[in-house]
Image: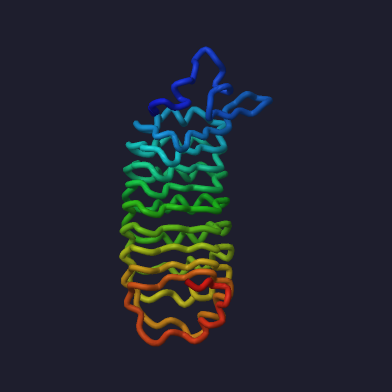
Amino acid sequence: MESPNSPLSTWDENLTPCNWTGVFCNKQSQRVVRLDLSDLRMTGSISPHIGNLSFLESLQLQNNQLTGQLPYEFGNLFRLRFLNLSFNSLEGVIPRNISQCKQLRVLDLMQNQISGQIPEEISYLTQLQVLNLGRNELSSSIPPSLANISSLTDLNLGTNKLGNSIPSDLALLRNLKFLDLTINNLTGSVPPSIYNMSSLVYLALASNNLSGDLPVDIGLTLPNLLGFNFCFNKFTGTIPRSLHNLTNIPNH
């Protein structure tokens, strides 16, 4: 990775990395536990040597100009809790061995060029709270196994090329507050169980090929909604009167 006129140019090999800008170490062990190199206009690719930082808990490289693929060596970072690579130009697939990062709480890959399928192995990240894969080139179906991540509060798969139907198993995510599936190729009707996810605060299904009627009691079964977007689909029937019960939604 390179960055003109950035803190990286001040890194001195004669000094301990713990004194480098953007590098944070455990005070006792002097091991690198956090890298924050966001917003530095960095170019180039992520080195596979990143996998040698086995004590790393947080890696933040968002808002740069990074290219290339996600290193397979990410799977060596078994202490990693936060991984934010959003707003770059990374490509290729999500490494399946990301499942070895079992401490992950946040996985944010938004706004890249990542393709292929969402690997089933992501469902092994049972402590994950935020999964943001929006604005990529992901295809195939939404894995029903994502429902195994019971700790999820935010799931963003919007603006990809995902097809087939919405898995009804997603309704098992009892802690989910944010669900964005907009701008994909999803078809069929929305599983009734999705409309019973009372924890949801935001539900966005716009710009797909979804069909069917909206349930008459949607305003009662989703009482905590602050925002929803169902436009540009193939829904039929009438607008449920129960939506008037969603008094927390701001007027625009």
In the image, what residue occupies the spot 49% across and 35% down?
Answer: 76
Residue 230 coordinates in the image, percent (x, y): 40, 73
Q: Is residue 49 above or below residue 247?
A: above
For residue 247, which quarter of the picture? bottom right
Q: Give the colour scheme shown.
A: rainbow
The furthest residue to the right: 28
In this rendering, the count of numbered labels is: 0
Viewer-proximal residue among 179 and 193: 179
Could you tell me which quadrant the N terminus lies in? top left
Q: Is residue 5 above or below residue 168?
A: above
The furthest residue to the front: 252
Viewer-proximal residue among 19 and 250: 250
Residue 131 coordinates in the image, percent (x, y): 48, 53
Image position of 184 (left or right of 31): left
Residue 99 coordinates in the image, percent (x, y): 48, 45
For residue 41, which quarter of the picture? top left
Q: Is residue 217 above or below residue 167?
A: below
Residue 157 coordinates in the image, percent (x, y): 41, 58
In the image, what residue occupies the spot 54% across and 21% down?
Answer: 17
